[in-house]
Image (cartoon, helix red, strand yellow):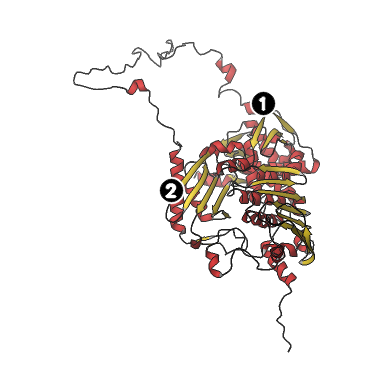
Amino acid sequence: MSDIIQLLPNAVANQIAAGEVIQRPASVVKELVENAIDAGASLIDIIIKDAGKTLIQVNDNGCGMSETDARMCFERHATSKISNATDLFAIRTLGFRGEAMASIASVSQLSLKTRMHDNETGTLIEINGSEVLKQEPVALQPGTQIRVKNLFYNIPARRKFLKTNNTEFRHITEEVIRALLPNSSVKCKLYHNGEEIFNIETGNTRQRISGLFGKNINQYLLKIDTGTSLANIKGYIGKPEKAKKTSGEQYFFVNGRYMYHPYFRRAVMMAYEQLIPQGSFPSFFVFFEVDPSTIDINIHPTKTEIKFENEQALFQILNAAVKEALGKFSIMPPMDFSENETKDIHFTSKTSFNPPQVKIDPNYNPFDNNKEFKLPSYKHKDRVPQNWKDVFGTPSDNNSISNISSIQNQGNKNNNDKTAEQTDLFFQIKDKYILTSVKSGLMVIDQSRARERVVYEDVLSKMQTQQGITQKQLFPKQLEISPKERSLLLEMMEELVNIGFNISILGNDSISINGVPAEFAKDNPETILESMLKIYTEETGNIQIAFREKLALTIAKAASQKFIRKLESIEMKTLFFRLMSCPIHNYTPEGKKILEIISVENIEKLLM
């Protein structure tokens, strides 16, 4: 039998490595920007076309490479960062695995131009799917320019599974933010399809946060700064009152490298307990400086999961630092005493003081209809108008429900024999449940879940017909957004317009909510929008849901999250009949029960 084990060709090996390192266009941007930062660049320009599918170009003014290094950087495991195994435990740079450039070149059409500052000319290298096509001298400014065209052109299956341009560009924006936050001395411009997305100037960390997430965030940042033998922890956290429905503004960095660390996130969230509503998320930008030998950053190809030697101790230090910042900057309102009331008060044996006097009417008789009841503390003693019953009505008046105008499609109630003989009486419990009588007993409806089903069906219908009705805002609401949230909105914008939203993007960091669907006229548009962004972000991983269904579910959830309030009789009745007209009215789009009928027999058993 002949030998069957053989070495893979370099091109195939590189494509396999690319499957781990280069998952989408954002992965390419991450690797190239990190290389530019490691090269000491103070200026980085990022040019994107079609969310990176057509072009990714990164220009920097870093140290550049020699002709030999320019050729060597495309070999597997070629790196300038480490030379032996012990160097793995002293890494302070970002790229070190030596697989990124080789992996990118294996799945794209790549060109590299680079020049060292001391050299008069630079080097041009063109590679097509790991095959070097050209290498020659070129004239250019010191630094490096890398153009990656037609990503995954030779792996159609991988390109097929890329998401929409807005989704892919949102991931690119996030990677750029992660790279720029700990490197505030780097100036960066990001362009997409010829449009400048942001232009970030150099400055301190606080200025960098404001540049990336909007100027308004600056006034809500609280500084943390603590130093121990294990680590120095610095950065900023957000004030509790600015906690959002989205968890996008939460970042950890260690030695300048972004990391994903749920354990440390829990330490921060515990410090905010009892300070923010459930389901809200505070902002934080936390930077750890630790001895590189106490962490392992080589446990995942993307280098975002990092293992710490002293995790439990650092958990306690971080939690204490956040609590200190929250307490130090007047989270609790100070007690304010008037100076005149607390100055020079001394009691002696001769001190006399008068007890407070309470004015009463000893002759007042509450059962005497001939006497007028007067409160001595009132300045105005006008009698209650005799015709107040005519203005406000009384419980003894005819039930106002009987005067409610008929509702369209009321006949839909006959679609379900359980709702036959429906009366006009609706009652509410705890501002959460609606009770009404049906033929077989008592129906109990969860009003939040009912609204979720109604809004879901309504939004899907309007997306298909593009006939959403807009309720104009008398005073348009302006909202600060991050680049990531901006990408999310762009992704949803066309369908949002179809269902009745009117949103203007004023710049890179703000929007104007000019109108909302009539369905949400009584809701806070900012709350609805924040909830939508949060839920949509959480649902992005579910590729089984079609885009329209996913967006409809997102809007329905956002609209029903805080639908726990007192409803007028007409509102309860309208919600009931709209629910009954839905194709499926027993369950929410995610399968949660909306209503329950308690039979007459069960009611009688309860009363036995």
Tag 1 residue:
403
Location of residue 418 by image quarter: top right
Tell me the amino acid under the disc marked 1. Answer: Asn
Residue 30 horizontal/vertical position (percent): 66, 55
Check the image and name the residue furthest to the left: 349
Residue 181 horizontal/vertical position (percent): 59, 48
In the image, 115 versus 28, the foreground residue is: 115
Tell me the amino acid under the disc marked 2. Answer: Ala
Q: In this view, does 428 lie above or below 25?
A: above
Residue at screen point 70% across, 39% down: 578
Q: For label 1, count other residues whose C-alpha is less than 10 Å away and answer few (under 14), some (14-19) or many (20+).
A: few
Q: Which of marks 2 and 1 is nearer the N terminus?
A: 2
Residue 417, visible in the rendered structure: no
Residue at screen point 49% across, 42% down: 223
Separation (CA) of disc 2 from disc 1: 61 Å
Q: Is residue 270 left or right of residue 528?
A: left
Numbered disc 1: secondary structure = helix
Residue 606, visible in the rendered structure: yes
Residue at screen point 36% across, 22% down: 339
Location of residue 406 by image quarter: top right
Q: For label 2, count other residues whose C-alpha is less than 10 Å away and answer few (under 14), some (14-19) or many (20+).
A: some
In the image, 488 versus 581, the foreground residue is: 488
Q: Is residue 580 left or right of residue 277?
A: right
Residue 512 horizontal/vertical position (percent): 69, 34
State the mark number for residue 320.
2
Location of residue 151 by image quarter: bottom right
